[in-house]
Amino acid sequence: MLATLNGARFLEEQIESLERQTVAHIHVLASDDGSDDDTLALLERARSRWTRGRFEIISGPGMGFARNFRHLIEQAPRDADFYAFCDQDDIWHADKLQRAAEACALGDSTRPFAFGSASALIDAQGRSLGQAPRRRGGPGIRNAVIQNIASGHTMVTNRAGFALLADTAASIGPFPHDHWLYLIIEGTGGRFHLSSEPTVDWRQHQDNAIGARIPPFYRPRRSRFERLRRGKLRGRMVASIALLDAWRDLLTDEAKEVVDQCRVIHTCPNALTRMKVLHRAGLYRTSFTGQIGLWLDFLLNFNVTRSVWGIQPARIPT
């Protein structure tokens, strides 16, 4: 599922990396969101030479990259074995899909399963910039309500996982599709496998929709404390539990417990009680500094001052 918008500068390299994949059959669904450069011409040329399956080009909704990926989820056929998100400016390692398929095959094919990995970083000229920061904790619902553990461009899910994603994606609004895949799979008893070995070269350049947090491509608009003060971590949890609660009938008992504990943490005015429930809930981020920020957020009881991804604090079930 390839989302494009004025991506001609790097698109050819990405398509070539798809052609180098070691799996035999790849069906490409490309949604172009209104490009006025050579993107569509490049897609047409790729389609004309593609021999490994279908290559379809559709028009995107013209409402930004997040909505374009949701459009791809809505339009993708339900009969594929595996599904992968694809950015227009990255380079996939040749064994990316093979590794993901092998990981997914280790589980029950009727159970939702998703694969994600670390990312190698490259600059606009393809030169190595090292590796994106490694995650130090494993996947789980107690992490998923706080953060997304893998970048969407590394994610692959099986048919059961995609069916779950497609059936629920219309309800998430502007909440990130990749975080929702992680969240709903963990919340419903599926499995998310995280590999520490990169499967994608994540290109860093000034036009990234979302880039790695390295200078000069990442320039935080506010200090870390200011982002905490504005309730960014709390806002992510607010959005996560509101969306999960909308699908409560699908959740495991553990996920329901986590949602209820998060509600107490968010609404309780007593700092000591909040911290006790936070400890009991076992919520965690995958870096030491991230975990410190989580504790500070709930200790100091920062307010969520505005909607986060369109999910208003008032929508938290009570």
Image: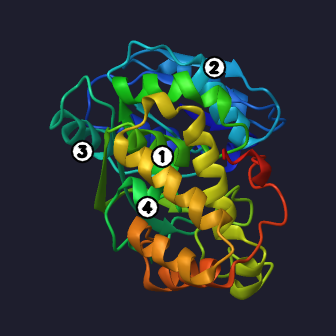
Q: CA distance from mark 3 to mark 2?
A: 26 Å
- Which of the two labelled residues, at mark 3 and mark 4, occupies the earlier sequence position? 3
| Residue matched to label 2 | 57
Q: CA distance from mark 1 to mark 4?
A: 9 Å
**Where does the image place residue 136, in percent across and percent down from the top left?**
34, 74
Image quadrant in which you'd find residue 262: bottom right
Q: Residues within 10 Å of mark 2 (few under 14, many from 20)?
A: some
What secondary structure is marked by label 3?
helix
State how many labels appear: 4
- Which of the two labelled residues, at mark 1 and mark 4, occupies the earlier sequence position? 4
User: Which residue shows up at 51% across the image and 34% down it?
Assistant: 248
| Residue matched to label 3 | 99
Disc 1 residue type?
Leu
- Which of the two labelled residues, at mark 1 and mark 3, occupies the earlier sequence position? 3
Disc 2 residue type?
Ile
Q: CA distance from mark 1 to mark 2?
A: 29 Å
Q: Residues within 10 Å of mark 1 (few under 14, many from 20)?
A: many
Look at discs 4 and 2 and give the one toward the viewer. Answer: 4
Q: CA distance from mark 3 to mark 4?
A: 24 Å
Q: Nearer the viewer, residue 249 or 86?
A: 249
What secondary structure is marked by label 2?
strand
Look at discs 3 and 2 and give the one toward the viewer. Answer: 3
- Which of the two labelled residues, at mark 1 and mark 2, occupies the earlier sequence position? 2
**Where does the image place residue 23, in percent across and percent down from the top left?**
26, 31
Q: On the rendered structure, is 288 left or right of 21?
A: right
Q: Which mark is residue 101?
A: none
